Every structure is written in C-alpha cells, then in structure tokens.
Image (cartoon, coloured by chain):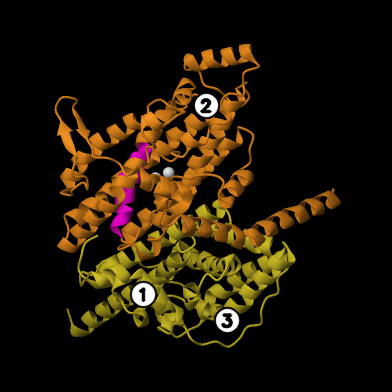
Chain colours: A orange, B yellow
Amino acid sequence: MYTQGLDSLGADCLHQATDAVTLEQRFQSKVDEDERIEPKDWMPDAYRQTLIRQISQHAHSEIVGMLPEGNWITRAPSLRRKAVLIAKVQDEGGHGMYLYSAAETLGISRDELLEQLLAGTAKYSSIFNYPTPTWADVGAIGWLVDGAAIMNQIPICRCSYGPYARAMVRICKEESFHQRQGFEIMMTLARGTPEQHRMAQDALNRWWWPSIMMFGPNDATSKHTAQSMRWKIKRFSNDELRQKFIDITVPQAEFLGLKVPDPDLRWDEATQHYIHGPIDWKEFEEVLKGNGPCNRERLETRRRAHDDGRWVREAALAHAEKQRARETQAA
Amino acid sequence: MSASAATVLSASTDLRFRYAVHLGDTSLILAQRLGEWVGHAPALEEDLALANIALDLLGQARYLLSYAGEIEGKGRTEDDLAFLRDPSDFTNLALVEQPNVDFGHTIVRQFLIDAWQLELFECLQGSSEPRLAELAAKALKETRYHYRFSSGWMVRLGDGTEESHKRVQDGLDSLWKFTSEFFAPGAVDEEAAAAGLGPDPASLRAAWAANVEQVLTEATLKKPADVSYRWFGKRNQHSEHLSHLLAEMQFMQRTYPGVQW
Ligand SMILES: [Fe+2]
Ligand SMILES: [Fe+2]
C-alpha cells in the first residue's frame, strides 16, 4: 500500500487527545454510525495527525511514482503506448494533486508537505525505490503495483474522513484503468516473441515480492492497525489485503503463462486461499530505511526538479505581485 | 487513363504524403521533447499542463502519420514512419528538435510554435484534402489552449523577476533564428500551397508576427533582430540534436525489429 510506513510512524500522537471526552465520544459515535467527518467537524488531534500522515504519504507516493514509469515515456515502443503512458503518468500527478488538497483540509499546506518529502522526513511507498530497466516493468507496475494500490484504496473510499474518501473514489476509477492497461502490456509481451516473454517473466520476478510487501508488515508486527480500524481509516488488516491481492493475482499470472517467483506458493483447498512462502522482511526494512536500489535517485530527482523550478515559481509570484500593484494603482 | 493523368495523380499522392509527414513530424518531435518534462516540471500544475500539450501533439502526429501511411499505400503504419525512418528523412521544423534546456527555453519554443500553429491550423481548415481539414479543426482548438499556456508563461517569466526575464530573453535570443523557417519558400509546404493542400507559408507571417510582438511587449521582452539562417528541417537539414532524440525514441523498434508491442 502507498502508506505502508504508517504503522511505524503514528505512535506518538495516538494517546494525546484524552481531555475532551464528550467531544471524542460524539466523534466516535459518528464514526461508528458510518457518518462522514468533514473538515469543520471536531476531531481528535491524533486522528487529524494520522490522516495527515497517511494522506500525504499517499500523495508523495503518487508524485514519486511518476518517476519509474516516466523513465519510459521517451522510449515507449509504439506511439499508442507512448500516449497511454504519458496519460497514465499524468493521472498519477493528478492523484497527487487531489490528495494534497485533501490533506490541506486538515490544516497543512502542500508546500509544507513537499518540504517534508524533499527533506526526507516524510515517507512514500517503498515500491517506487525499485528500478525500471526494461519496458516490461511498465507493464508489471500497472498490473501489480496499481493492482495492489486498488486493493488498498477501495476500502478507503469508505474512509470516515470525507475529503479523503471522495478523493479516493475518483482515484480508484483511474487506478483500475491503469491496472487493465498494465495487464494488457504484460499479455502482449507474454504472448509475443520468446525475448518478449522472457522480458515479462523477468519483470514479474523482480516486482512480485515488492508488490506483496506493499501491504505493509504482518498483522502480528503491525501495532497501530486497531486504532485506525476503530477510526475507520483502515477497514482491513495488512494480511487480509495481501491475501486478497494474491488470490486475485496468481490466476492472472497463470493466464499470462508466467510463473510467480515463489516456490512455496500453493492453493489450499481447506481455506480456499493461496498460501505463500516467507516474505523477506529484511529487504522491506532495508528499502524503508533508504537502502533500496533507487531511494537516493528518486529523492534527488524530485529535489532537482524542485530546485530547478524555483526561479519559475518565484517569477510567477513576482508577476502576480506586480499585477496586483498595477491594479491598485489604477483603482 | 492516359499516362500523364496517372503521373499527375501519383505526384499529388506523393505530395500529400510528404506534406502530412512534414506536419506530423513537427508535432511528433515536439511531443517527444515535452515528454521529457513529465515528472520533472517546476510545479505539479505545469507538469500536468506540459503532459497535456504533449498528448495533444502526439495525437496530431498519430493522425497525420497514419494518414500519410494510408495514402502512400505501401502498408507503412504510424509506428513505421515514426520509428523506422532515419534523421535525414524527417521534415519537422528544426525549432521543435531543440533541447528543453530549462523551463524558459521550453516556453519560448512552445510559444513560437503555438503562435505559428494557430495560423497554420486556422488556414488548414480550408484544405482541399478533407482529412487535413478535419485534423486542422480539432488541432486548432488544442492549439488555442497551448497558446494560452505558453503566452501566459512568456508574460509571467518576462515580467517576473530579473532572473526569469534574463532566462526567457536568452531563450528567445537563441531560438529566434529558427522561426525564419516557418515562412521560407522552397520546401514541401510551398508545394502543398500550390496544390491547395495547405496555406502558403509566407502568408502566415503577418498574423504570427503581430501576435508574437504583442506578447513580447507585454512580457517586456526584446524581439531579436531577424538573422539570415537557411538550414531548414523541412528541407531535411537538421541540427545535431535530432539524431540523439531519435536514437532514444526509436530504441525499442530498432533493437527488436518487427515485433508487436
Ligand atoms: Fe495513482
Ligand atoms: Fe495508477
């Protein structure tokens, strides 16, 4: 999920809002009755902080997520694929915008959030710290990463916080479009020449485990799920979502004629679920800590764009200022 | 049918092909340049806007190159034309292959070409070739939006800070020489005009210059002096940048010939 670092971050602010008991009770009963919390409503500070963290991590993920796939815009293998890819990467930028706007309703500005991202103090989804060396990676990302994102985000369409839930409805529609496009790229490759098939299998090999890690740590080690569930920010546990994703995706891989790179993977008749092999959480932690293959590059690229754009943003402000001055003078 | 009538017919097919490729190449190469910006623009809004313009231009290119392949009748697709021709076969205006450099250069390049496409597509709506007229009507609407974006930024940057003024003036000074090609005779667009396919390139100049001058004045920028510059992309004379651009753009199709993607 785009917010998988959350469980290790929200700890300190969870127990502060204990004074306004009646307000809090009223808030919780609203949440319990599936009423939406809106920006002007009273809410516990911990709820607000948790949401800011989660929404901004999600927004940052959209923005950083533009980079691995954007890497292929200039080299897309056909004009149709190029157009679809530009539109997709542009959609992700749009998602970032809706989400920053949703976060702003909680009393923090997009600029502040961007500063946190560039300073390296905010998290974004670790999945985007993996590289896209081949065209098949564009297919694999659409199929698996957008696929996993949908799994996480559909429940958020019913999140207790109104602006987040509404942003997510719009985003989910586009994500499912991305997922289908990614799958279609994989299908073309998997059924293409032996070289293309190999390219598709190689991409699946590299993206499978990072994708299933997107759902975050195992429930046993994930400390803050309970509170988020009580607040209806989260509706399913990490492991439940991961299981759903695997159950849906494994048959898709079979349909493509590709092999999921998990020797222990098997269908379990009794539970009617796939059972997967052990996840390498060491790798997950390493990437989360900043030691993934592209952590540095991704942040440096964002910083460079931000720094190179400074004079442009300053010019826009200066021009608006001049315009205002001229208008006052004329009046 | 007499031999001479057949010659006339095939000549006009060839001209329609070359003219559509010339217009298509210009849109394609500019789309490719703008695609380089996606994910790297100065702010999210500009990122989305540049991607939008790239998508519009790519749409125009696909329409024109598909049409060209169709009338050529040799079974070449939009992709064959985009990915399997050599730099010397391209006839885009040389301006659009110039590198992005910075947001200032990019905006200047966009503004100069948008102002030209405004006039071009306006006139092309009256083409004797219905397929070109149809393309022009759609592209004109898109170009109006592109022009609003690029001329707005010309003014903001020109009349912004000292730094932005200098950067956009630098861009203007280095790119201005490429605009003489827009209106120069002796290439496919002049032939197309004679056949009623498109406007006479020289006829677009007055309206283009009026728009450009008005925006430059508002932007407090100095119009560079016209220079004599006679290396024209539409005559297959390209800068060093085009082959680099194509090496990147054509990489997959060249590496894996004949494969479907
Ligand atoms: Fe997205
Ligand atoms: Fe997406």
- Residue designated by label 1: B247
Left or right of A111? Residue B40 is: left
- Quadrant, the C terminus of chain B: bottom left
Magenta residues, start to end = A135-150
Mark 3 surroundings within 10 Å by alpha-carbon count, few (fewer than 14), some (14 through 19), many (20 or more)? some
State the residue at coordinates (36%, 65%): A75
Q: Which secondary structure, mark 3? A: helix
Left or right of A307? Residue A265 is: left
State the residue at coordinates (23%, 40%): A277
Whether residue A178 appears in this view of the structure is: no
What is the distance, in whole Å, between disc 3 and disc 1 at their CAs? Answer: 25 Å
Mark number, residue A161: 2
Left or right of B162? Residue A299 is: left
Amino acid under disc 2? Tyr
Residue B15 image-quadrant placement: bottom left
Whether residue A286 appears in this view of the structure is: yes
Amino acid under disc 1? Ala
In the figure, A303 relative to A328: above or below? Answer: below
Q: Which chain carries label 2?
A: A
The spot of residue B70 in percent (x, y) is 25, 67
N-term-proximal mark, 3 vs 1: 3
- Residue designated by label 3: B177
Number of the front mark, 3 or 2:
2
